[in-house]
Amino acid sequence: MSSETKQILTTDGIPLEVSLKKAERKNKIKAFLLVAPLLLFLVITYIFPIGEMFTRSIDDKMITNMLPKTFKEMESWDGQELPPEEIFSAFYYDYKALVEKQEHGKLGQRLNKEKNGFNSTTKRLFRNIKRKKIDESASIKEQMMKVHKNWGKVEYWQAIKRTAPPYTLAKYLKGMDMYYAADGSIAQVEEDRRIHRILWLRTLEIAFFVTVFCFLMGYPIAHLLATLPMKYSNLLMICVLLPFWTSLLVRTASWMILLQQQGVVNDFFVMIGLVADDSRPEMMYNKVGTYVAMTQILLPFMVLPLYSVMKTISPSLMRAGKSLGGTPFVAFWKVYFPLTIPGIGAGCLLVFILAIGYYITPALVGGASGTLISNQIAFHMKQTLDWSFASAMGLMLLTGVLVIYWIYNKLVGVDNIKLG
Amino acid sequence: MSKNPEFVKFDKVDKSYDGKVLVVKDLQLDIAEGEFITMLGPSGSGKTTCLMMLAGFETPTHGEILLDGNIISNIPPHKRGIGMVFQNYALFPHMTVYENLAFPLRVRKVEKDEIDKKVDKALSMVSLSGFETRMPAQLSGGQQQRVAVARALVFDPAVVLMDEPLGALDKNLRESMQYEIKHIHESIGVTVVYVTHDQSEALTMSNRIAVFNDGKVQQLSNPAELYEKPVNSFVAEFIGENNTFNGEVVDIAKDKCKVKLANSEILANPISVKSKGEKTTVSLRPERALINPTDKMDNMFTGKIEEVIYHGDHTRVRLNLLGSSEFILKVPNSTSNLELKVNQDINIGWNSADARALDPK
């Protein structure tokens, strides 16, 4: 049968498939040219930076390039005992070259991150090289051990060896409050220093509850929007969208005015006698502020997908449910609610993903207990300038979002999402 | 078993949505048990509002609706036990056919075995056995329609309401569904209140038809009477085709009256005219006028053929008669067909009993 279908020819004897391809080729090229600018734009602004972020987050080439001879000699060193003379002299010449290029400071800092005490150890070697106290014809190993006792300790040489590979996952481990121990195994940082894990959990927690709050508040609004007569629903729609059109910064700032201790809300509470004037509750610079402001800001992202789905649900379905004997609640729960699930899915996914990477609002109203992982990323971008760590955390966040998307797809099915 | 002639009763029901305009005016309507009654009327005539009030989705502004002698105005829709078929079927799109049919039974806490039995029975009634696991979207329009009918009947309601249920189907399917619904009604004897704006649907299916216009029932009678004996010119106009003459009564007797037209006089049957000098609209069905009548008829005129349109089973002829060029004749296409040509003059005759002098338009 397949051979028969293959032999279909057009009237002038060209196989149908070939003819079809020829006829469609022009359209295909046109279609591709139309999307080409976007494709190029995406590659330049999205795929390329993510790739760049990834290489930066695992890149450890700087030190590999600084100590080429050392690492070459170290290939045959098993790392159990103090290295032989060749490694010492290789390191010495590498370091001397760095001193001449005035890059020895960077090496000291980098090694110090790997093992505390390296800074002073290398500085002492630097001073001896400057004063030309090292006799290059004698044993370099013994002279270096005399310069600083740390050169005689095997842990320091092990630390150098660990930095040999051009790539490292150390930044990712750091993002999860873990590190490579001296023997190369993965260890946890002390309990009182595990700040990142707290931040990750807090980010998830805040994103989750913001999503829940948005859903609880957005569902009735969306329902009202979808069922009210046009003239009222238009007005309500503007009320929903108006904050959406206002600058994020302005909205966050207005929440600061409302929520601060001498702010409008607290004044109101005092006025109606809910709280005493001298014990005004803290509603900002903590989680409460983050919750309130983020819920308000992300609400339209919940309302709009819900609204677009609810708009398509015929009111006669609820009527049918009731006329068939279902109480209003049963009709809602068995008929209306299941039909809004695609909108709920889209709204929740949208709000959750936006919330998980939220930055400005928590930075302004979150205080210490209300900041999220994105604030930590920004901190490393701007304050510590540890861009590779910031990249690693950014990628972890991205991976997290993708995992959530995947789970969601397994549970609800992305095809069921309706954004409008 | 004696049937209750007032099984459903609209008692002086008024309905207004905005407090200014009455959509339904002083409706008085009794529906007998087991009857198939159709509310027929143009859109905006109040027929759907009546149905919605009966179903409980609208409340009467004034008056009461009684079901089997009980006032139901204060009973919420889900407790009325009235089945309803909606215009766009309103099948639950996320449930299978079985779940759709089981819904009214499940909310009534019927046993699982009983549900299976009833769903089976209802599906075989609409000849859809074996479709239980399909989703509504996998069914054709006609099949969805049948599921909707089965769902409205599966919980044995006393009354079933149908709100233009066949409106979305194509012509052939609509006709076969009309017979199907009629047969289902005959076999289970449920009271059906049917709303439509399609007169042929109403004539085919109903025991009685209530013609609505302007919030009022214009005429309530069986299909034959409605067609043959319309009581006013709206009904005559709305049901079937109609030739009309506007004129003034110049002479009136018990069963005949003389109506003066622009430049001639015709004899008619006085229905809503009482005395000389009244304006009237005379209505005559196209098939009641004959060409070259052999019997003596009391209205005999000559007209000129303006247009001949072939319609398959019959031919429509438009004539210029008595100063009007809109006079329509329906001539059945039989073997002894007449030669009808445009511009030909032909003799037309009809009996005065068939020409009904109604209220003026």
Image: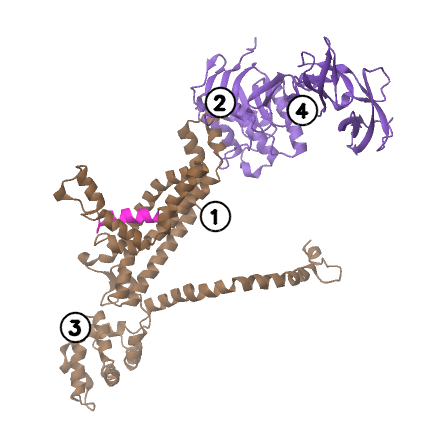
For disc 3, the marked residue is A117
Q: For mark 1, does the 10 Å Cα neighbourhood hold few (<14), some (14 to 19), or many (20 or more) residues? A: few
**Residue B164, position as x, y percentages in the image:** 58, 28
Q: Quadrant of residue A194?
A: bottom left
Q: Position of residue B15 (x, y in %)?
A: 49, 22
Where does residue A164 sit, x and y in percent of width and height?
Answer: 29, 74
For label 2, the SS is strand
Q: Please tell me which residue lies in front, B334 or A61.
A: B334
Q: Secondary structure at mark 4?
A: helix
- Image colour for chain A is brown
CA separation, marks 3 and 2? 91 Å
Give the main secondary structure of the magenta stretch.
helix
Any mark on residue A415, and which? 1
Magenta segment includes A293: yes
- Spatial separation of the CA atoms under disc 1 and disc 4: 52 Å
Mark 4 vs 2, N-terminal side:
2
Q: Which residues are magenta?
A: A284-298
Q: Considering only vertical position in the picture, is A263 above or below B333?
A: below
Q: Pointer 4: what residue?
A: B237
Q: Which residue is mark 2?
A: B15
Q: Nearer the viewer, mark 1 or mark 4?
A: 4
Q: Mark 1 and mark 4 in contact? Answer it, CB < 8 Å.
A: no
Q: Write down the chain letter for disc 4.
A: B
- Mark 1 lies on a secondary structure that is helix
Label 4–label 2 contact, CB within 8 A: no
Q: How is the image coloured?
A: by chain
Output the chain of dot 1: A
Q: Colour of chain B?
A: purple
Q: Amino acid at mark 4?
A: Glu
| In this view, the mark in front (2 or 1) | 2
For residue A251, above or below residue B141: below
User: Which residue of the protein is positioned furthest toward the bottom in this rendering?
Assistant: A137
